[in-house]
Amino acid sequence: MNGITIGDIQKKISNSLKKIDLTDREIQIERNLIIENTLSISLKEILLNQDKKIPNNQVRKIYGILKRRIQHEPLAHIFGEWSFYGRSFYVNKHTLIPRPDTELIIDIVLNSYKNQKGLKILDLGTGSGVIGITLALEMIEPDITISDICPDALKVVSQNLQRFNIKNIKSIQSNWFQNIIQKDFDLIISNPPYIDANDIHLTNPSIIYEPKKALVSKKKGLDDIAVIINQSKKYLKKEGQIIIEHGFDQANQIQKFFLREQYDNIFSHQDINGKLRCTSAAYNN
Ligand SMILES: C[S@@+](CC[C@H](N)C(=O)[O-])C[C@H]1O[C@@H](n2cnc3c(N)ncnc32)[C@H](O)[C@@H]1O
């Protein structure tokens, strides 16, 4: 192993990652993440130090990571943490790996509410806690409740609350609204399961490492969203708002659910690729 440079290890990692079904862009991202994470250096340092030798123990560590990754184990699980909205959160097999797509919800909330103090917010199906915790860190003294049906996910939430030294978020185990008592939320937010059980993406070998309960919903992926839309209006203040993440082809159906339940100001939001990935609505009755 003597004499392996950063440039050499980049090539070795790329060649290994070609064995699994990743795009060239994904290979580049994962390769850099593996080096950054193992050597604790920045991308800039990787690029500026191509001829620098890597200590043997770190080369071995990288080979260990690659061995697991080419069996499709996600990098997030190998590292035990993953980035969301510029911060690194603990994750494990009980929590969804936070997706960049979900950052759209944060942008929507901050665009409308960033300067409002003390907003009462409920994050339903919080997983590792990324949405609620990010809002706790980005907003002015919000009053945040987060909940999930999965007790093991809530253990990860606790670790993340400690990691960011947050003491004032309420964390509740609940099957959607079953154990939620508070009924005056300004904002209910959810990235619920919304994938149809027959969706081709579920055959991706990396996806089997993630909890099915976090991904799949009955009735073509819409069952949980329908429940949340139906129930939320009892838990919102007058003119309170709900924002839901959904699949790129579900906006139409979700707008219909909101209309059926007599919400107003129904609006679907585009992500950076122009896809409608979140729908918001207000309840004024
Ligand atoms: C798509 S994941 C989202 C996780 C996290 N909010 C994120 O964006 O990374 C959906 C979450 O909903 C939770 N969930 C599924 N069914 C639920 C239910 N009936 N009640 C409450 N939470 C549920 C899952 O455990 C999972 O953590």
Image (tube, rainbow, N blue to C red):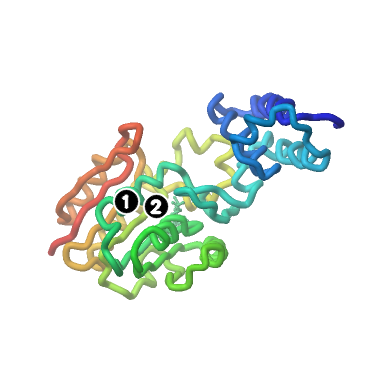
Give ligand 1's quarter of the image: bottom left
Q: Is residue 176 left or right of residue 67?
A: left
> How dense is the environment of label 1, judged by Cα within 10 Å: few (below 14), some, or many (20 and up)?
many
**Image quadrant in which you'd find residue 268:** top left
Which disc, if any, is residue 41? none
Give amino acid for label 2. Answer: Pro
Q: Please provide percent x and percent y for residue 34.
A: 65, 39
User: SS class of the residue under badge 1?
Assistant: strand
Q: Is residue 167 left or right of residue 94?
A: left
Foreground pick, 76 / 257 = 76
Give amino acid for label 1. Answer: Ile
> Given the current orientation, which residue lies at the most extreme bottom position?
181
Residue at the spot 39% in from the left edge and 68% down from the top edge: 145
Residue at the spot 27% in from the left edge and 47% down from the top edge: 279
Q: CB of mark 2 within 8 Å of CB of mark 1?
A: yes
**Quarter placement of the N terminus:** top right
**Quarter placement of the C terminus:** bottom left
- Vertical comparison of 18 with 161: above or below: above
- Vertical comparison of 180 with 87: above or below: below
> Given the current orientation, which residue lies at the most extreme right position?
2
- For mark 1, what is the residue? 244
Foreground pick, 202 / 284 = 284
Residue at the spot 81% in from the left edge and 39% down from the top edge: 55
CA gap, disc 2 and disc 1: 8 Å
Q: Is residue 61 left or right of residue 86?
A: right
Q: How many marks?
A: 2
Q: Is residue 186 left or right of residue 99?
A: left
Q: Please provide percent x and percent y for residue 242.
A: 27, 56
Whether the residue carrying mark 2 lies under 8 Å from ligand 1 is answered with yes
Which disc, if any, is residue 192? 2
Who comes first in sequence, dot 2 or dot 1?
A: 2
